[in-house]
Image (cartoon, rainbow, N blue to C red):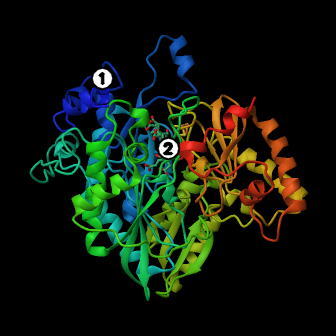
């Protein structure tokens, strides 16, 4: 591998003068709404992606117009916590200065603003800074927004775990002053620019970290390069089990790519957390593949060098030995929609937000509703990895008022089915440049059909973890679903079956390249069998394995693609 030519991304990172490039010059270029050359990639490290609306791309091309370039900006929120005041600032910007007027909660507890014109980019960074926020390292080859289980009920433990998510996020941030210089006119120049952890060429690929509080696996730890699984004693956090090398992306037709579960490294006590985070990141920095971006993530590095070799290197760099993994188990991944009371006497309202999209539409003024709550709420907001929103820390006095506002703005809908609450889609069209098939926009209709099927087979109280992702990059985490649809082409999907409720098993390809109607016909037959032959309380994903519909994926680097070859 040493002799392989470095990928062009390596050249542009190393020549970027620590992520500055010529972004500042580009900002004053009115001839294009986009970013030129390397800057197109470099703005990602500052939390933005250049996009255009694919629904109108052809129409503009026919008129000989440049695509309507805008950026999607992703706000960094470790553990997904944001104050009502911060929310309101973002809400006003989204309404007044974005093409779509929406705020999108992502499945990594961040916020996305789609459709920001070039002239509004600097103002939005300055607004974020004013609100105590930023979009640093929410994209690019760096450690991304750090997740933390969003269950507010275990509030003391959650608070401790959340503090670690924040510390890890800060510790692994790029140390360049480029963000401050380019967007804040140098207002917040931080520190000496020493990229000792990430290196001057940053990481070989994106890197994802999660802090998980069992038995809840809402963060989907196996989607992450690095996981800290909380271990507690009498409600106090005492350390973490560390798991490394999860990831879900693949490329259709390329067997060298595959989703992978994270491997257990061992237990560490709390004071070793940052050293271990740093050692895992720096090992991946030095050993990750910088020639082929398709094989550059930590999961491939682990499989290339071997888990034991990677782990030994982390131990050497962090100057410790992992202890034996402490027992832990997961029971599920869903959010409890509705009110819960915490051990602190406060109340928490989890709102189901369809695909995390806050926008006002007829009869559903969801975005205005959240803003109305933000105007009076004294606690904080928490974004969940299921793209939902928790109004956390509500006093007994304010509970009825917040409940009334949520109902008035259709943020509480008692009719939402269990199946809808357990389904997820990635953004896909019209903003995602990589989309092959619809995801977010087709999900509601698919769930209508699934609800009808489940009712027909007397299963309306049951739910299957169902996820749609518009391309094999897998943002919708279909590779950890009981039923996963992966976009193939417009209107066509690959159907995967056999993940489990806990998110610890990768599903297997069952049928490829089918239209939705054909998929629903297949699913109806499988759901009918599940209803007729399931064991008591047996989940759908476990049933299709026991019933030999698909073989379980046991070691994805070896057996994930096996079945593909048997499918015509
Ligand atoms: Fe993702 C790229 C949206 C979670 C794997 N992802 C993209 C881009 C930025 C497209 C692009 O590169 O131009 C999408 C922007 C669409 C849009 O218009 O908003 C996009 N990804 C999303 C979000 C918003 C999906 C959502 O519906 O919530 C999630 C943002 C998370 C965040 O706040 O940071 C999102 N992406 C994920 C996940 C799930 C996770 O991390 O839990 C995955 C699979 C896990 C993994 O990384 O293995 C994921 N996204 C990818 C990949 C494939 C990476 C790879 O290993 O090859 C890409 C493409 C790439 O990086 O080249 C990608
Ligand atoms: Fe876009 Fe593909 Fe990610 Fe969906 S899975 S948001 S289509 S990159």
User: Tag 1, which secondary structure?
Assistant: loop
Name the image quarter holding the C terminus. Answer: top right
Residue found 42% across the figure and 77% down from its top: 231
Can the viewer see residue 131 in this picture? Answer: no
Q: Nearer the viewer, residue 40 or 31?
A: 40
Is 314 in front, or is 83?
314
Q: Position of residue 120 (x, y in %)?
A: 33, 38
Instruction: Give the residue pinned by disc 2.
Output: 101
Residue 68: image x %, image y %? 45, 25
Q: Which residue is mark 1?
A: 36
First in sequence: mark 2 or mark 1? 1
Q: Measured along the vertical axis of the image, is residue 236 above or below residue 115?
A: below
Left/right placement of residue 118 relative to residue 507 reads: left
Asked if the residue under mark 1 is in contact with the one under mark 2, i.e. CB atoms within 8 Å, the reply is no
- Where, quadrant-wise, is the N terminus in this rendering? top left
Which residue does the image show at 53% across and 44% down from the upper left? 557
């Amino acid at each position: 591998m040493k002799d392989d030519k470095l990928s062009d991304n390596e050249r542009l990172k190393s020549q970027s003068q620590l992520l500055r490039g010529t972004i500042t010059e580009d900002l004053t270029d009115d001839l294009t709404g986009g970013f030129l050359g390397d800057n197109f990639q470099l703005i990602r490290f500052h939390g933005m992606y250049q996009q255009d609306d694919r629904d109108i791309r052809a129409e503009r091309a026919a008129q000989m117009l440049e695509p309507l370039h805008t950026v999607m900006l992703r706000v960094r929120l470790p553990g997904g916590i944001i104050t009502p005041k911060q929310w309101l600032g973002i809400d006003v910007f989204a309404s007044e200065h974005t093409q779509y007027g929406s705020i999108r909660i992502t499945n990594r507890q961040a916020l996305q603003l789609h459709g920001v014109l070039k002239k509004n980019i600097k103002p939005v960074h300055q607004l974020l800074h004013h609100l105590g926020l930023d979009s640093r390292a929410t994209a690019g080859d760096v450690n991304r927004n750090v997740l933390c289980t969003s269950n507010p009920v275990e509030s003391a433990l959650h608070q401790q775990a959340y503090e670690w998510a924040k510390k890890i996020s800060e510790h692994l941030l790029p140390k360049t002053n480029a963000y401050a210089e380019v967007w804040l006119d140098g207002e917040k120049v931080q520190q000496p620019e020493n990229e000792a952890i990430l290196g001057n060429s940053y990481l070989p690929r994106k890197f994802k970290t999660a802090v998980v509080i069992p038995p809840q696996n809402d963060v989907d730890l196996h989607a992450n390069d690095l996981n800290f699984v909380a271990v507690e004693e009498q409600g106090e956090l005492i350390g973490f089990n560390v798991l490394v090398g999860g990831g879900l992306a693949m490329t259709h037709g390329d067997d060298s790519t595959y989703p992978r579960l994270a491997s257990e490294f061992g237990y560490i006590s709390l004071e070793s957390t940052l050293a271990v985070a740093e050692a895992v990141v720096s090992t991946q920095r030095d050993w990750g593949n910088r020639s082929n971006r398709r094989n550059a993530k930590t999961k491939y590095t682990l499989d290339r060098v071997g888990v034991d070799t990677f782990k030994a290197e982390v131990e050497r760099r962090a100057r410790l030995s992992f202890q034996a993994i402490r027992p832990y188990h997961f029971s599920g991944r869903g959010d409890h929609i509705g009110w819960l009371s915490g051990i602190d006497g406060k109340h928490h309202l989890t709102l189901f937000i369809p695909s995390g999209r806050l926008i006002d539409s007829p009869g559903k003024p969801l975005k205005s509703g959240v803003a109305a709550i933000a105007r009076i709420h004294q606690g904080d907001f928490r974004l969940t990895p299921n793209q939902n929103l928790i109004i956390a820390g509500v006093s007994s006095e304010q509970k009825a008022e917040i409940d009334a506002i949520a109902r008035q703005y259709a943020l509480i809908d008692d009719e939402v089915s269990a199946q809808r609450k357990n389904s997820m889609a990635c953004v896909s069209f019209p903003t995602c440049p990589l989309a092959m098939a619809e995801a977010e926009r087709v999900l509601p209709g698919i769930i209508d059909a699934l609800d009808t099927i489940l009712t027909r087979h007397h299963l309306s109280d049951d739910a299957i973890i169902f996820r749609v992702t518009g391309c094999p990059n897998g943002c919708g985490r279909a590779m950890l679903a009981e039923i996963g649809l992966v976009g193939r082409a417009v209107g066509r999907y690959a159907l995967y079956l056999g993940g489990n409720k806990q998110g610890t098993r990768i599903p297997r390809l069952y049928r490829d390249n089918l239209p939705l109607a054909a998929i629903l016909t297949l699913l109806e037959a499988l759901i009918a069998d599940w209803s007729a032959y399931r064991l008591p309380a047996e989940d759908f994903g476990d049933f299709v394995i026991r019933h030999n519909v698909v073989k379980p994926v046991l070691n994805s680097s070896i057996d994930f693609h096996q079945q593909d070859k048997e499918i015509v």
